[in-house]
Amino acid sequence: MTMKKGRRNFMKNSALGAVAGTFGFGSFTHASTQELVQSGKLSIESWSKSKTYKPLDTLKLKTSEPGTIKVADGNFNIYYTTPITKDATFDIGGAAGNQIIILENKDGKIIDTIVFKVAVKTEINDKKGTYNELMRLLLWSMIGEWGETSTYKYNKKLYRVFVGWLRDHTHTMKGMKYFFPYLKDGFDLYKDSQRADGLIWDNIYARTPEANWWDKVLEEGNFMMKIENDTYEFKRQPVEADMEYLFVECLYYTWKATGDNEWMQSGLDACIKAMNYATTDKYRWSQKYQLVKRGFTIDTWDFVHDYDREQTGFGGGQCISIDKNEFGIMHGDNTGMIAAFNYLSEMLQIAGRADESKKYAQLAADFKTKLDKVAWNGKYYTHYVPENEDFWKKRNIGATDPQSQVSLSNAYALNRGVTHEQAVKIINTYLKIKSEMPKTSAGEWYAIYPPFGNGFGNDNGMWEYMNAGVLTIVAGELAHGAYENGYEKYATDILKRILEIGRKHGNYLYCTYKGSLPTVPDAKYTTVTLKSVANADFYGKGAPGVPGWSNEGEINDLSEFPVGKQTFKNIPFDIVDPATNGRKAALIISKAAGYTMKAVLPIGKNAKSIYILQARSKSDLISTLKIKYTDGTEYIEYMVGHKIENWWFMSDTRGNDSYVPRSDNYKVAWRGKNKKSLNVAIGIYGLNNPNPDKTIAQLEFEGMNNSDAKWFINGITLSDQPVYFDQGDVSFGIPDRWGAAACMYALVEGLAGVKDTGVAFDKVKLSPKWNIADENEVEATIAYEASGGYVTYKYKNSDTSLELLYTGSGSSAAVEILVPESKNVSKIVVNGATATFQTKMVEQTKYAVFNINKIGVNRISVNW
């Protein structure tokens, strides 16, 4: 590896060898700096022991004695040499860490040395700031949900993982590997716990001492393992068929980031065992198609169709029965296997296991041939291919044509080894969806499109979650694949739209958005005054015979609440002004002194829905709203749960998530403050009238004797349409970090153009595409925290030329310069010499291609 090569080069020079012999390799620290600076003849302008530099920073040197300067990087490779009389400058390059500047006299004797520290971190700084903002937004979205990691204990060892599900950990690592140093635990946890037959567990969770629902559900098939004195459990969602290939992917990308060959090799046999399980086990292997099978789910997700749930008879839709269920081929499981076979082949080759490497490369090719025959329809992979011919006749999926559905794993397929021709057709399929999707959609990045009309329950209702929710996972994978296949403008457009979506949602990127928003009804509203039933003031002082708002005086009232004609959440209300109604503005139902336990409000109108401007005190309000009709019938609505919330610190969303509503029929209407609380509020509850054809005679508000709470009612409005609130566009169901990570790796490998083709960036493909994004000045560093491997460059583009200054921890780069439209390359100069290059076309995009094999700083000049 690079370190060994660097040491050999370092030792070739006898003077440097003397330094190495004196101080030892890898022992250069700040503590030894004073020993290395022996004479003070050499100095760095504005230098101090504690100062840390970045790659491509320029250092200014001064010497009191002429000689030769040699600079060695953190891997002991000499990357810069120059004679010096009085002063000299150089740009920092090569491997990060402790670098050394050596001053030799004319006889080759070392007369002074300085050690300085070079540190790297992933960052993009474009002049306009657009993609710096996007990178920061994506990083926050990867860690803002639950923090960077969670820690689990197994067999007396602690493991730090991004998410307790291996799937989510692996997908999150696509982005977090550029920012976080501890990556190995995610693979090690599931390697160390691997079932004897090769199965890989799905997740790890804390459990209660007593038996739980999963104990019985997962008994068939042995899909649970209790650990740590039965306080934790590993589970496998039985229907899932992706864990084994994701296990291999986890090893592969962790190895890439760490550069640790020895550790990688220690995991290979576990990967082989996992792949053998996936290709032989009765739950996973299709004898008919000789491919990986699964139950009938939406793409890679873990809930079967209602019919299949009934056939299984247990497990809440996540279980499968070999004897009762039918199976089929979901293409994503198999493109994942193809990619994993290729990853395994590459790792086995590095491990010196050439015969096995060839075997898995051939398996990848064989799988690809079989999958294309079974599922490739000429434009994209068909979502699900059943083993049984009468499969679709048994299942009610509504009017959906399963042969026309495009599911999310087509975006993954772009990055798992499909041909360029297939990639182009998949990308064009998404462009077609973009042209025809609902106007309210966040993007064409659907989990599946069009949705299933029936059969996947409330958790997967149409246009939500996996049943045609819009996934940022798909956006990231699609953008990455588009960058690789000549659709650079489209890929950049995706990233720009992702940034706009994040800005819209508080500079945070959710993973799932609604695939279509409901049409806003053209409603007519009728406000109803509370003058006749109002019994309390908004102000705490009240008046003789009229209680104040909360019976706590002016310190805790609703005195900021607006009166008169008001609109909250697009719904009009007529709020009583206490100054014009004897200080009576609100109706407060309570058994406390001064209030009332029952009030009757005359209506005399028809309505499809009733909006109640209301709140409660305490947390135990149980009261009733009775609708009495003119025909003598009545309906009772109990005010409890999310129909009504506390007037202090009110929320209409799930936990701390400010974009996911906890109820479709409840919204916070108004917020204010008083002398005691900085956050008081009133909400709106929308009640759909169960008898809209009947005339409402009156509304009766009544409290419960067993409740000490107050029911605050500030307004009533009728509507000729069912209840409608804007519920926002955020859906649910998937960790947000998963989608943000996919977009991050599209930004890094696609637009920024830094792709690791070796390990720890010892070899890279360097292909920045900033001119596509109209960004002409960019400085970027892409680094692995786990190994210190990195690439740094400064990019400057103009109408006549492109200047690229770059360095990194490796020595080999395949450079691909994107040539702007209507331009041709006239000359490329690399490190002062004219370079030979080739031109390649990827669809309509032209690239100038050449290689560089030089440690340290490289200067590239491209003339148009």
Image (cartoon, rainbow, N blue to C red):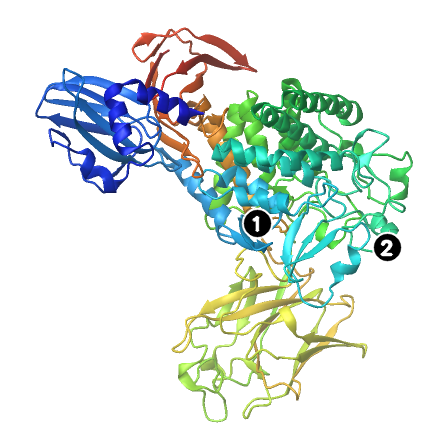
Farthest residue, direction left = 64
Residue displayed at 46% across by 51% down = 506
Q: Amino acid at mark 2?
A: Gly
Frontmost residue, 650 versus 41: 41
Residue corresponding to mark 2: 313
Up the image or down, 675 lies above or below 240; here it is below
Measure the alpha-carbon separation of dots 1 and 2.
Answer: 30 Å
Residue displayed at 44% across by 41% down = 179
Residue 737 image point, x, y percent: 54, 46
Q: Quadrant of residue 738?
A: top right
In the picture, measured across the screen, residue 691 lies left or right of residue 45, that is right
Mark number displayed over residue 759: none
Residue corresponding to mark 1: 163
The disc, 1 or 2, on the residue closer to the chain's N-terminal end is 1
Dot 1 falls on a residue whose secondary structure is loop
Residue displayed at 69% across by 65% down = 609
Image quadrant in which the N terminus is located:
top left
Up the image or down, 7 lies above or below 173; here it is above
Q: Quadrant of residue 78?
A: top left
Up the image or down, 763 lies above or below 43; here it is above
Residue 502 image point, x, y percent: 49, 45
Pair 1/2: label in front: 1
Q: Amino acid at mark 1?
A: Val
Frontmost residue, 864 versus 2: 2
Dot 2 falls on a residue whose secondary structure is loop
Residue 185 image point, x, y percent: 54, 45
Residue displayed at 57% across by 32% down = 265
| Residue 504 visible in the picture | no
Residue 337 image point, x, y percent: 69, 31
Frontmost residue, 560 versus 755: 755
